Image (cartoon, rainbow, N blue to C red):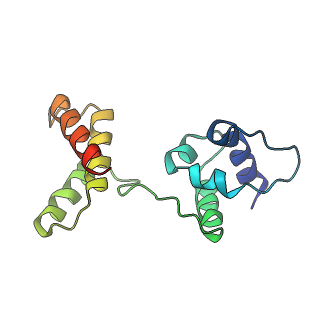
Amino acid sequence: MSVRAENVLKNLAPELTGETPPKGRWIPPIRLLRSLSYSDLVGARNCGPQTVDEILRWAKSQGVMIRRPFHAGKSLSAMWRDLIAKSATRDYSIEEILEALERSVRRKNTRIPVGFQDILMNLLSTAGK
């Protein structure tokens, strides 16, 4: 693992596990990797796409899968088009619909009323648990 990836994980460790990593080289514990999400990495300081990919590969080599969003890198309209196309074959998951609704609400999409999006998002999040 590169020093940059290690530093990103060192910065995230206190908020995710409550532990402060030591100075110098450090191997992140599995507990940290299990509590790590894709959005934690994307929002982390000094963590660009290459560093995110490196951390995801390293976590996978340690036996921990960190799931990428279903619609990473797609526009909101492309995301909705994909879901509409998948609905014809019922080839979608509740998590995928929830992710699309969360993103739509966050972007304040007016194509579907935001209040209705909130209701749908709440229903889907409770159904998925």
Q: Looking at the image, which residue sits at the far left?
A: 88
The residue lying toward the viewer, choosing from 22 and 8, is 22
Residue 89: x and y in percent read 14, 70
Q: Nearer the viewer, residue 105 or 26?
A: 26
The residue furthest right is 24
From the top left corner, tell me how far across and down residue 75 is, in percent: 31, 49
On screen, residue 21 versus residue 32, left or right, reads right
Query: Residue 77 appears at what percent x and percent y?
Result: 23, 48
Residue at figure coordinates x 24%, y 49% from the top left:
127
Count every numbered label the image shows and give the total. 0
Q: Quadrant of residue 106?
A: top left
Q: Say which of 110 and 18 sits in front.
A: 18
The structure residue drawn at horizontal position 28% and vertical position 34%, both measured from the top left corner, is 105
In the rendered structure, the answer to whether residue 23 lies left or right of residue 109 reads right
- In the image, 75: left or right of 1? left
**Quadrant in which the N terminus is drawn:** bottom right
Q: Is residue 45 above or below residue 6?
A: above
Query: On the image, which quarter does residue 69 sit in?
Result: bottom left
**Residue 82 left/right relative to 129:** left
Residue at point 57%, 50% (across, down): 36
Give x and y (percent) for residue 120: 19, 40
